[in-house]
Image (cartoon, rainbow, N blue to C red):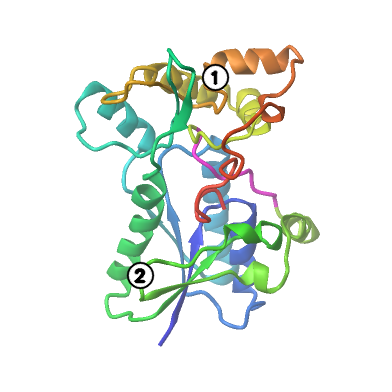
């Protein structure tokens, strides 16, 4: 027996996937939806998730499971302070202060805070499951994000892509049914944000932005890393970048970018 489970990010695409799935638009109906909480989503995501949990319970008698491997923001500071041995895995951008050479740290956060918590929970609630179809909310306009699981007992399925449903179609579906449209789901301190999204955080959740600035300043001298670390891909202090943007200067996203394939993308399972 194959079990159909949704990896829920509580963003636009994965929420639309959940609602369409519960309506039976993809033949099979999901038995579970799992939200892996990194502890660092925008406040709007948590508010929306709270509404969504109540909505699907009332309309479909369906439960959303919430799991967590810890708070990635707190873990980052714990590692910096030496009270945590394991690197939290955020792919900070690096810059050598002498040569100016830029780089990026290895990403582990997706696996540690998103993928593995979901898999552990599946094993917990379905200990005998030998075949799981894990649905991911990636839309047709993001087809390049498709990736298969690296374990044999899980097969990734992309129902929105199967039906050629784009992100704009997801938004239209919410509006057509009189439902609120989700905000973008992604860790506040994710270095893959575009300038547009950093501005959204700054203007809509100033305390979340200030918290990101605190981390950005703290990682300048990172344990075991000779280069300076930054949250923004320009390898400049986040606080200064935002000031420049607000002054009407050219967005950093229009500048030379050595990481074009990484911007606003996180292995196909983050921020969906």
The residue under label 1 is 238
Residue 206 is covered by the magenta coloring: no
Element type where label 1 sits in the image: helix
Q: Residue at x 56, y 46 (%)?
A: 265
Q: Nearer the viewer, residue 172 or 179?
A: 172
Q: Position of residue 132 (x, y in %)?
A: 41, 76
In the image, 68: left or right of 29?
Answer: left
Pick the residue in front: 228 or 1: 228
Residue 186 x, y percent position in the rendering: 53, 42
- What mark, if any, has residue 151 been given in the picture? 2
Circle 1: is it few (<14), some (14-19), or many (20+) Cα within 10 Å? Answer: many
Spatial CA span between label 2 and label 1? 38 Å
Q: Position of residue 215 (x, y in %)?
A: 42, 22
Q: Residue at x 57, y 51 (%)?
A: 51
Observer-nearest residue: 101 or 218? 101
How many numbered dots are placed on residues in this image? 2
Pick the front one: 99 or 44? 99
Looking at the image, residue 139 lies above or below residue 196? below
State the extent of the magenta-drawn residues as a range. 180-188
Classify 76 as above or below 174. Answer: above
Neighbour tally class for label 2: few under 14, some 14-19, many 20 plus, Cα within 10 Å: few
Residue shown at 37%/37% (left/top)? 72
Return the disc, 2 or 1, that comes first in the chain's sequence: 2
Is the magenta region chiefly helix, strand or loop? loop
């Amino acid at each position: 027996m194959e079990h159909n489970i949704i990896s829920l990010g509580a963003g636009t695409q994965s929420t639309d996937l959940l609602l369409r799935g519960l309506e039976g638009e993809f033949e099979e109906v999901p038995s579970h939806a799992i939200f892996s909480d990194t502890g660092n989503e925008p406040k709007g995501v948590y508010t929306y998730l709270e509404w969504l949990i109540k909505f699907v319970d009332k309309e479909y008698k369906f439960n959303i499971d919430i799991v967590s491997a810890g708070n990635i923001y707190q873990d980052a500071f714990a590692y910096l302070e030496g009270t945590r041995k394991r690197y939290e895995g955020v792919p900070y951008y690096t810059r050598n202060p002498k040569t100016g050479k830029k780089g990026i740290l290895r990403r582990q956060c997706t696996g540690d805070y998103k993928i593995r918590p979901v898999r552990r929970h599946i094993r917990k609630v379905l200990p005998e499951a030998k075949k799981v179809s894990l649905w991911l909310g990636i839309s047709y306009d993001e087809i390049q994000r498709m990736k298969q699981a690296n374990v044999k007992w899980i097969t990734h399925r992309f129902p929105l892509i199967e039906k050629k449903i784009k992100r704009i179609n997801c938004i239209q579906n919410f509006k057509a049914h009189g439902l609120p449209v989700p905000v973008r789901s992604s860790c506040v301190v994710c270095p893959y944000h575009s300038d547009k999204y950093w501005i959204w955080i700054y203007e809509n959740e100033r305390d979340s932005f200030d918290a990101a600035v605190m981390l950005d300043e703290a990682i300048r001298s990172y344990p075991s890393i000779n280069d300076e670390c930054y949250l923004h891909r320009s390898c400049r202090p986040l606080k200064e970048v935002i000031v420049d943007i607000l002054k009407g200067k050219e967005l950093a996203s229009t500048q030379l970018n050595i990481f074009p394939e990484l911007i606003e993308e996180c292995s196909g399972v983050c921020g969906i």
